[in-house]
Structure formats: C-alpha cells, structure tokens
Image (cartoon, grey):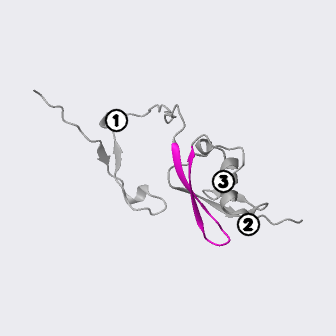
Amino acid sequence: MATAQLQWPMALPVRLHDCPRGDPPIPVPYDPTFLNATHASLLVVQDHKPNRASRVAVTVLSGSDGKRVPFVLKSTDTIGKLQRRFLQKRPDLTGSLNLAYNGKPVQRHQSLGELGVKNGATFITFLRCLGG
C-alpha cells in the first residue's frame, strides 16, 4: 500500500530592504509553480454559512461598573434581543443602553451572524451624551 507524502509550501526568503517599514523578515509561503510566473489570478472564496442557527455564547460588559453578564444566543438573534435580555438582568440601565462590538456601535436590527460574532465575544455598554 503506497502512502502519499504531503509537501508543505516552500518559504520565499525576504530581505530587509524588501520591508520598507523595518518589519522583521518573515518567510512567505508560496507554491513553487509561481516562482517564475509574472501574473496570477485569485479566486474569492466565501466562508461557508451554516444552514441553521448556531449557538453563540456572548458576554455583555457594563462599561459603568465593570460587571459581566453572560448569555447564550442563536446566530440569527438580533442585537435588540440581546439588549432586552440584558435589561431583564440589569434594569438599572433602561433607557441608556447602547452596545459596541469590536469598538463599533451596533444597531438593534443587526443579527449576531451579520456582525460575525464568534463564541466568547464581548459586547460593551456605553452611554451617549445628549445635547448640542
């Protein structure tokens, strides 16, 4: 019985003068068939989206007091649902609850799947100042 041997991509050496910002030289993996190529085409491949809603464990961190509240939601659930469930546990924040994910404010109509929320993600509450 013959076994196939996997061959890892070779590493293209990088010289310091190839790094204009002084980044450390890191070997760049490449396919040897591209060594003498002048042009190449890339094919965009989208991530596989699950057919059904997957469970996502998220945490909401209260920016005012540092308390964490964990939740388990579906990837199809919206930010509005997360806000409602959070307010059931923390009614003191009613009327001023805004959430941010990855440093950006999120809208009530957005779903966790649309935002690319992964298991273990953290949302942070913040206050908006009214006035002009």
Give the overall secondary structure of the magenta segment: strand
Q: Which of the labelled discs sits on residue 85, or is there none?
A: 3
Relative image position of residue 46 (x, y in whole percent):
51, 34
Relative image position of residue 80 (x, y in whole percent):
70, 48
Q: Are marks 2 and 3 in contact (CB under 8 Å)?
A: no
| Number of callouts | 3
Q: Earlier in the sequence, mark 1 or mark 3?
A: 1
Residue drawn at x 12%, y 28% as measured from the top left: 2
Q: Which residues are magenta?
A: 55-74
Q: Are marks 1 and 2 in contact (CB under 8 Å)?
A: no
Q: Tell me the amino acid under the disc marked 2.
A: Asp
Q: Earlier in the sequence, mark 2 or mark 3?
A: 3
Say if 66 sits above or below 100 in the image.
below
Q: Residues within 10 Å of mark 1 (few under 14, many from 20)?
A: few
Q: Nearer the viewer, residue 40 or 98?
A: 98
Q: Nearer the viewer, residue 5 or 129?
A: 129
Relative image position of residue 92 (x, y in whole percent):
73, 66
| 81 relative position to 54: left or right | right
Q: Nearer the viewer, mark 1 or mark 3?
A: 3
Say if 6 sits above or below 100 in the image.
above
Residue drawn at x 65%, y 60% as measured from the top left: 89
Q: Secondary structure at mark 3?
A: helix
Residue ID for mark 2: 92
Residue drawn at x 32%, y 33% as measured from the top left: 33
Q: Which of the labelled discs sits on residue 36, or is there none?
A: 1
